[in-house]
Image: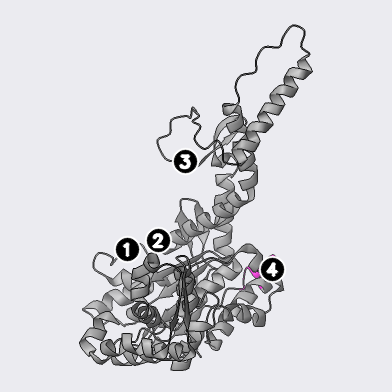
Amino acid sequence: MGALVPIQLPASSEELASLDKLSPREIVAELDRHVVGQAAAKKAVAIALRNRIRRQRLPPEVAAEVTPKNILMIGPTGVGKTEIARRLARLSSSPFLKVEASKFTEVGYVGRDVDSIVRDLVESAVDMVRREKVAEVRERAAAQAEERLLDLLLPPARPSLPDEPAEAARDSLRATREKLRAQLRAGQLETRMVEVEVPERSFPSFQILSNQGVEEMDGLVDAEQVARAAVERVQTAGILFVDEIDKIAGREGGHGPDVSREGVQRDILPIVEGTTVSTKYGPVRTDHILFIAAGAFHVSKPSDLIPELQGRFPIRVELDALTEEDLVRILTEPRSALLGQYQALLSTEGLKVTFTDEAVREMARFAMEVNQATENIGARRLATILETVLEDLSFEGPEKGERSVRIDGDEVRRRLTPLARDQDLSRFIL
C-alpha cells in the first residue's frame, strides 16, 4: 500500500528496456522504482500495456477487433493515480495527456468541444516524435553547423604565388581551417562575430547552419514524417488520463448542474467508444487509445455514471489510502525520493544535509496528522512539510559557506509542532 513521489526528470533512453521484452511483472517492477505500493493499480495497467504488445502480434483483421480494456481508478487524492499512469506512458514511450473532466462543467466550458482533448494528445505526440527525430540528427546538425561557421570564419584564400604549387596553397588553407576548428571546439572563438544572411520569415522557425547555408531544422527533420508518426503513435499507443471523473458523475435531474454533468459524460462517450477526430495533422481514430479515468468518489459512486460510460471502463481498481509507514517509504525509497531531491538541491551550494531515521518518521507522522485534521491531500503534504523544516536552510543558502547539517527528530518537532497545534494556521501553512 502507498502512494507516489513526483519525479520531474524524464527517464533516459538507456534506462528503458525493450517494451517487447517486459512481462507484466517486470512492468510492475519498473513502476515500483517510482511509485510506492498500490499493487492492484500497477497490475491493472501492466496487463493493459502488455495487451497492446499482444495485439500487435495478431493478424490485422483480428487486431482491429481487439480494443483496450479501459481502467477506472478509485481513490483519494495524492495516492498515486496520476503518477502510475504517467510513469506507464513514459515507460512505453506513449503519448500521454491528463485532463480534468470537471473543467467541462465550469462556467464558460459547458458545450466546449470535448474533441479538443484528442487534439491536445496529438500535439503532445508531435512534440515527442519531433524531440526524438531532433536527437537522431543532432550530431549531423552540429557537424554541419561547425563547417558553416568555419566557412564564415576562414579568411578568403590568398592568391597562389607564380612559383607556388597549388597543392601547397590547399595544404596551407587546410591547416588554417583545422587550427580554427580546434580553437572553435576549445571555446576560444566565442567573442568573434560573424554575419549570416537568412531568409525573412513571418513566423519563428528552428534553424541550423550547414554547408549550403542556413537551413530550417525541417531540412533534417521532415515535418510531414513527424506528423504521420505522431498520429500513428496516438492511434496505437496513446494514453488519455481523465481525472476527476467523479465530479461529472450525475444523472439528469431536469435542472441544475446535473444536466451539464450528464451532458459532459455523453460528450466524452463517443471518444471512449471509438470515433474519428479531425486534427490539423489529419483524422485520428480513438478506438485503440487507452483511457484511464480516476476519481475519489467520496460523494458519488461509479454507478452514478451513465451506464454507457460505465461499460467502457470494465477494469476497476481501488487505491489504498496512505498510512504513516507509506509516507516514510515515500520519503526515502523511490528513485529521486523527496529527501534526495532536497539534499541534491542544497548540495549545489555546499550544504550537506542528512536526516536521522527519527526525523523521517516524525515528518511522516506530522503529515499524517495534518491530513487527518485538515484536507487529506495524501503524499503531496510531504513537500509542504519538508519546505517548512528546511525553510531556514534554504533561505540562508551559501551565506555560511560549506557545512554539514544533521536534521533530527527534535528539530522536526521544533519546526512543526507549533503549526500543527494551531488548526487555523495549519490549514494555511501546512
Residue 379 appears in which quarter of the rendering? bottom left
Query: Where does label 2 land, which residue?
Result: 116
Stretch of the chain drawn in magenta: 55-66
Indicate whether 191 appears above or below 113.
Answer: above
Q: Quadrant of the C terminus?
A: bottom left
For marks 2 and 4 on the same chain, the one whose residue lies earlier in the sequence = 4
Indicate whether 358 appears above or below 181.
Answer: below
Residue 250 appears in which quarter of the rendering? bottom left
Three-letter code, disc 4 = Ser
Residue 20 shows in this picture = yes
Query: Where does label 4 land, which residue?
Result: 18
In the rendered image, residue 59 lying in the magenta stretch gets the answer yes
What mark, if any, has residue 205 been given in the picture? Answer: 3
The one nearer the camera, 137 or 228, is: 137
Q: Kindly indicate whether the residue at mark 1 contacts the one at mark 2 (C-beta within 8 angstroms).
A: yes
- For mark 2, does the 10 Å Cα neighbourhood hold few (<14), some (14 to 19), or many (20 or more) residues? few
Q: CA distance from mark 3 to mark 4?
A: 34 Å
Element class at badge 1: loop
* Residue 353 spot, x, y in % from top left: 46, 77
Q: CA distance from mark 2 to mark 1?
A: 8 Å
* Residue 78 spot, x, y in % from top left: 41, 82
For marks 3 and 4 on the same chain, the one whose residue lies earlier in the sequence = 4
Element class at badge 4: loop
Element class at badge 3: loop
Three-letter code, disc 3 = Ser
